[in-house]
Image (cartoon, rainbow, N blue to C red):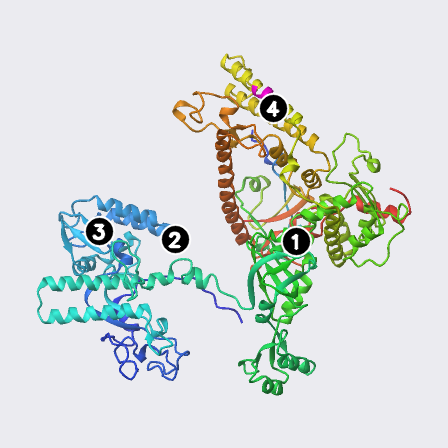
Amino acid sequence: MKMKLQDHMLVPKHELLSKEEAEEVLKVLNVRKEQLPKIRADDPIAKEIGAKPGDIVRIVRDSPTAGKSVVYRLVI
Amino acid sequence: MIPKRVSSIKFEVLSPQEVRRMSVAKIITPETYDDDGFPIEGGLMDTRLGVIDPGLKCRTCGAKAGECPGHFGHIELAAPVIHVGYAKLIGKLLNATCRECGRILLKNEKRDKFIAEIEKSRELGQDFEDIVKEVFRVTKGIKKCPHCETEQMEVKFDKPTFFYENEHRLTPKDVRERLEKIPDDDLPAFGMDPKAVRPEWLVLTVLPVPPVTVRPSIILETGQRSEDDLTHKLVDIIRINQRFMENKEAGAPQLILEDLWELLQYHVTTYLDNEVSGIPPARHRSGRPLKTLAQRLKGKEGRFRGSLSGKRVNFSARTVISPDPNLSINEVGVPLVVAEELTVPIYVTDKNVEEAREYIMRTEHPKANYVIRPDGRRIRVMDSNREELAEKLEPGWIVERQLKDGDIVLFNRQPSLHRMSIMAHYVRVLPYKTFRLNPAVCPPYNADFDGDEMNLHVPQSLEAQAEAKILMTVQEQILSPRFGGPIIGGIHDHISGLYLLTRGEKNFTKEEVMSIIRPLNITKLPEPKYDDMWTGKQIFSMILPDITIEFKAEICQNCEECKGEECENDAYVVIRDGELITGTIDEKAVGAFKGIIIDEIMRKFGSEETRKFIDNMTQLAIRAIMNAGFSFGISDEDIPDDAKKQIRDLIKEAERKVDELIQAYREGNLEPMPGRTVEETLEMRIMQVLGRARDQAGKIASQFLGMDNPAVIMAVSGARGSMLNLTQMAACIGQQSVRGERIGRGYTYSNRTLPHFTPGDLGAEARGFVKSSYKDGLTPVEFFFHAVGGREGLVDTAVRTSQSGYLQRRLINALQDLKVDYDGTIREQTSNMLVQFRYGEDGVDPMKSFRGKAVDVKRIIREVMAEEGKEV
C-alpha cells in the first residue's frame, strides 16, 4: 500500500483547479498560462492529484512571514 | 524599435585565403615613412590601412583620420611558421594522426562512435572537452596506423614551437604538410568543424597586419615619431622575411636558411605573445619588454578586464576621509581643490542667463570652468576669453560651474555591498584635502578613519540630481531594508557621552548646561528640577521630539522580575511626551543598528525630524563627554593584589580539576557522555572547567573595576568593547583554540605541542590555556599558543570574505532582473514571468516594516488607547 504524498507533513497542499477557477486566477494575476511557474506532469504529486499538462495547480503552503501563502503552477 | 539580438557567436580560425581576402594591401617593405614624413606605399603605415595623421585621407574608404575605422593588410611569409597559441593543439593532432596517410589513428567505427558522442554533447549544450581529451589519449597509444599499417613514431612537442620526431626536427613546412593530409571526415573526432578550421591553418603562411588605427604612432615633444610596439614587431618580421627570401633566391646554404627561419619563427611568436616561457621576450631599445597582441588582452589592465568590464568615469573624485561632527549627517565636506575641479552644468535659459553670466565673470571659487556651445564645442573659461564668452552667452548654452555649498553629490565606499554604500550628501566646501563626514554615517559605509578612501560623484542632469535628493540622501536611508530598523545612529563617544549625561540624577549648573547645549539650537530652558540645577535627563530631553516609549536599556541586567520604572540600575527607559523620565540612554536607545528612539522618531515624524535629532544628539553627546571628561589608560585595568590572588587561586583550582579529570580518564573511571567517546567527553569537560574559570576570573576582576571605570562604561553602554575584552585585559586570556578544539597539533609522533611538555600531556598548560592577562603579559609558551589561535582567526577572515563575496556576487547576478510589479508580484524584467505571487509571500517592504514584522501591534494598541485617553 502506497502512502499518499499529501499526508506527509512536509508536502504542502496541492489542488487541481477547474477550468473556470483557472481562468479566474489568470485574470486576477493578469498573466498568460506560460508565465506561471511550472510543475512537471510526471512529478509524483502531480500524478497523485491527476494533473495533466495544461492544468493549473494551486499550492497552499505555510509561510514564516505570511502565515499561509498561495501559489499557482502550470503543469507541463 | 525592436533591438537586434545576437543569437549566437561562433569563433573560427582565419584561413590564408580569408586573410588575403580581407587585406587591402600587401606589405612588403619595413620602412614606414619617407624623408618628408609621408607614409610609404607598401609599408606598415600605408595609407590604405587607414590614417591617423590629421589631414590625410584613407586610400581605401576615403575617410579622414578619426572617421576611417582602418583596414587590414597582410604579409606573405617566405616560409610557414607555427602559431604559438595553437602549438599545443598541433602537437596533439600530429600524435593522433598517421604520419603517412594523415588519417586518424582509429578504425572508422570507433571514430564514428566518438563523433556521435561529441555531437550529442554539443546538441545538449554540454562541454565535450573531456571526450576530445579521451580521443587524444586513446590515439596516442596506437603504434600502427589502422588504415595504412605504417608504424607510428612519437612526435615530441618542445615548448614553445618546436616538434621532434626521433631526435629529428620537424620544420613548420613538414608539420603543415602532415596537417594538410588529415581528411575533413576525421576532424569532428577532435572537436573541430572542418568548415571553421582546417588543421593546416594553424601553421601561418600569411600574416594579417592590423590597421594603423590599432597601433597609432605618437609624436613626442621633440617632434620625433615614436612607433607602437606592434609596429616595431611587424618591422622585425618584414625584415627577416625579406632576408629569408633574398637568401633563398641566392641559393644560400641550408644552415643559414634554417637559422633565418628560426629567427622568423621567433619574431612571429613574440609578435603574438611576448610572455611565452622558454624564449626571451623581445625588448625595446630601452630594455623594456614589448607589449604585443596577447599582452594587450591579458590581465587586469588588459582589454577585457580593463577596458570592457571596467571603465573610468568623469565628474568624480577620491580621497582620504576624516570625521567632522560639526557637519550634518546629510552633508559631506569637500576639499576646495576638489570643488574647483568638479563641475555642475547650468542649462542656460532666459531665466538664469544672468546668473550663468555671473559665474563666467567670477575669478574665484564658485566660478565657471567651461562653457558648452549649442554645437557641442567645449570652451575653457580663461582670463583671456572671459568677457567675450559672457557676452556671447545665450539660452541653449551650458555653463559648467564649480561645485559649491548645497550641491548634491553621491558618496561611495567600496566594497558596495548594500544600497547604503552609495548615498547622496549635500556639499560643504571646506579647506584641507580630505572628505569630511559625520561619524554617525560610518556604520552604513562601514568606514573608519584609519586611512579609508571614498569616492564622490557629481550627478549632471537635473533628473539625476532630483532623484538623488529624493531617494538617496542619507536621511532617507536611516532605516535599513535589511532588518527594518535604523542603520544610522550614535557610535563610540556618542554613546559613552549620553550614558554619562543621563545616568542617574546628575546635576548641572546653568553654566554647565549652557556650555553643553551651546551648539544646539535651543531657545528655551525648561524649569530646573532642583533649585537652579538641571539633571542630565532634562538636558537630553531638550533635543527629544514629542514621543512616548518605554524599553529596557542595553545595561539591563535581565533581572528575574523587572521592576520597570523602579529599576535600581536605571536601566528601564521611560520617555513620556518627549521627556526622559527614567533610564539611561545607551546603545539600545541611540546606537546604530539598535537605536529604539531613532526608530520611534523616524516612524512618528519622518526622516527630516530624525536627521535633526541625530545631528543634535551627536553634538550633545560630544559636549557631554567633554564636560565629564573621559579617558582610558593602562592603569584603568589595574586590579588590587587581593583580586589578583583570588584569580590565581581560582585558576589553580581549575587546573587541579583538569588534572583530576585526566587522572580519571587514565584510570578509565571517566563516564562518557551520551553519544560521545571517552576522549571527547574528557575534552568537553576540560573546556567547560577552563571556560568557567575564565568567566569567574572576569567576574572577580569586574567587581574590582567598578561601574565608573571608563572601560566598564564603554562595555556596558555598548559604546566599544565587551566585558570579555576587559576580562582578557585584566584577569585571564583563557583557552586558545584551533577549530573549536584545544590546541593539540605540533609534534604528532610524540603527541605533544611543544618540547617543553612530556609526550601525551593533556594538561591545561600543555594544550593552550593562557592564564596570564594581557596586562600581566604572556609567558613564551603562552605567547606561542596565542599566536597559533590568532593565526586561525586571520586565515578565517581572509577565507570568509572571499567566499561570502563570491556568494553575494552569484546571488546578485541571479536576482538582478527581478522586480516588484505594481500588483505586488515579483516578475522577471523581460519575459514577465511570475517568480513570486506576492513579494516575500507577505508583500511587506522590509524597510517600512517594524524590525522585520509587518505591524507593530504594541504600538497600535498604545496609540488607540491614547486616543481614548486611557492608560496602558
Q: Alpha-carbon distance for marks 1 and 2?
A: 58 Å
Q: Quadrant of residue B10?
A: bottom left
Q: Amino acid at mark 3?
A: Phe
- Dot label at residue B157: 3
Chain of the residue under the numbered disc 4 shown in the image? B
Residue identifier under label 1? B439
Task: Compare marks 1 and 2 and give the one earlier in the sequence.
Answer: 2
Q: Residue at x 89, y 43 (%)?
A: B871
Name above or below for residue B636 compared with residue B766.
below
Tags 2 and 4 touching, CB below 8 Å: no
- Dot label at residue B702: none
Compared across the picture, whether B313 is left or right of B708 comes to left
Q: Residues within 10 Å of mark 2 (few under 14, many from 20)?
A: few
Q: Alpha-carbon distance for marks 3 and 2?
A: 33 Å
Q: Amino acid at mark 4?
A: Arg
Q: Quadrant of residue B26?
A: bottom left
Magenta-highlighted residues: B649-655
Chain of the residue under the numbered disc 1 shown in the image? B
- Dot label at residue B648: 4
Q: Residue at x 74, y 33 (%)?
A: B558
Residue B650 among those drawn in magenta: yes
Compared across the picture, whether B402 is left or right of B98 comes to right
Which is closer to the viewer, label 3 or label 1?
Answer: 1
Q: Position of residue B481 (x, y in %)?
A: 66, 51
Considering the numbered disc 4 on the image, is that residue within a helix, a strand or a loop? helix
Q: Amino acid at mark 1?
A: Pro
- Dot label at residue B123: 2
Q: Alpha-carbon distance for marks 2 and 4?
A: 74 Å
